[in-house]
Amino acid sequence: MISMWCAFIAMGQAFADNVPTLDLIQAHGPKLFAGGKEIRLRGSNLGNWLLQEDFMFGLAGTHSQMRGAMATVLGKKAAAAFWDEYEKVYFTAADARFLAQQGYNFLRVPLNQNRFEDPNDPGQYDQAALRQVDAVVRLCKENGIYVLVDLHAVPGGQSREIYADSLWATPEFWRYADFRKRSTDFWVMLAKRYKDEKAVAGYDLINEPNTEGRTDLLTAWHRETIRQIRTVDPVHLIWLSGDNYGKGFIGLPEDLFADEQVVFQFHIYPSFTYPLWKMKEYPQTVDGIRYDKAWLRERLREQIAFGKRRPVLLGEFGFSFNKGNIPLLQAMIKDLLAVCDEEGWSWAQWSYKDVGVMGLLSPTPETPWKRFLASAEVQADLGRANELFAVRGVSAPSTGRLAASIGSIATNLDTQVGKHINLSARRICDDALSQAILYHLKDKDEATFRDLARSFAFENCRTNPPLAENFLRKRAEN
């Protein structure tokens, strides 16, 4: 493995001599152009860097819960040492060179506003964290890679889900106007920062929103945020996602696209698209429907309201390589990418690096963090918790006794109400599980925590074959 990474690094200087100059990306009709030439974006997402997700990191709960658990159990000093090292090594020059050498020209960078802004001191932003984003933009620029700044989680959460850092499984962002104003202000700050940076491919306003019936609030927030961004940056692309988890155009009326540089993004995953529980192969006919490339193309055209004829970005897609029928999922993704190529859409796979579930790269089993997660003590904690409440990301998922009990209580309730009760209970259990896992690291020294964090450094990671077959150089160049 070391020799493989050394070979990649040795190629760096030769590659650097041919790095393209990045011109500002602009939209003209259904296509993107940079420097007068059409460009299609091909890349990945920097998930799990400034916004942790449980299954991508190895603990349980939301970003704020996991970080809070670490500070509570290990102490603020030890937690700070871990996160300082983690954020520093997660994406470096070696990572940027690697992506560029694979033919990628695009990186979507998810941000959690809670990482930058203390809720007790709104409007004051962590300058050190912002400089880290600056550094990623610079590294990508040096390697011919455009960066899309993605607001992946907002105060209160734009949906009930883990990725939204929704602490109590309620999308409070749509309940409180103050949260929405703070996120608009956050965007104005970012737009001022990057208004002259050609390597920034634009602003992804909000990730996978789900208003649960208040689409009008999403539309109004989009209008106001676009208006305010344009007071400081009149030129960069602004990427919009619709309601219902960014699957289509819900809540995106025509007037939002009056500005030609306002463009469209959507997300799709096989597990939410196909009846996988009924399929053993692909293509396959199920219940009289032929699930194949032609079917997929039609569903995608319906989903993105193809007639709007604007540039399209498939901002997230992928599959877990640690469960399911991998050849079937690979075949689906192959067709998905072929449709994108044929329709002229840009794409970004989810995700570049994680603990070993969906990442192109993951820490090797010999790294301190992977050894810790695989230890008998941690596995015992996970097993007991899984029996109780079905832990996300474990190798043997369970319905869980708690989930079953809640389900029996919520039998006569509205589906959304029942989901809220279940997710709220899980958040409490997730918090307890993370603290229990981290207790096994109690009283370790600062050097130990920095070693654990360095597990995610490029030189300590390897590619994951089921994903590499789809997404590395051969795919990116198409």
Image (cartoon, rainbow, N blue to C red):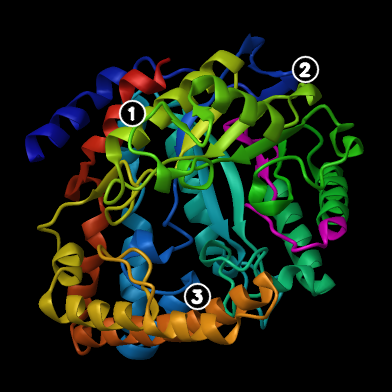
**Is the Cβ of the residue at disc 1 closer than 8 Å to that at disc 3?**
no
Q: Residues within 10 Å of mark 1 (few under 14, many from 20)?
A: some
In this orientation, which residue lies closer to the viewer: 391 or 13?
Answer: 391
- Location of the C terminus by quadrant is top left
**Does 204 lie within the magenta span?**
yes
| Residue that badge 2 annotates | 29
Q: Which residue is drawn at 54% across and 79% down?
A: 422
- 385 above or below 415? below
CA separation, marks 1 and 2? 29 Å
- The kind of residue on which mark 2 rests is Gly
Residue 162 picture location, percent across and down: 52, 66
| Residue that badge 1 annotates | 470
Q: Residue at x 31, y 71 (%)?
A: 82
Is residue 383 visible in this depiction of the protein?
A: yes
| Residue that badge 3 annotates | 64
Return the mark for residue 145: none
Q: Give the range drawn in magenta.
A: 194-217
**Does 332 lie within the magenta span?**
no
Q: Earlier along the polypeptide chain: callout 1 or callout 3? A: 3
- Location of the N terminus by quadrant is top left
Q: How crowded is mark 2: few (under 14 residues within 10 Å), some or many (20 or more)?
A: few
Left or right, 288 with respect to 382, comes to: right
Q: Find numbered disc 2 in the image and state the secondary structure of the residue it sits on.
A: loop
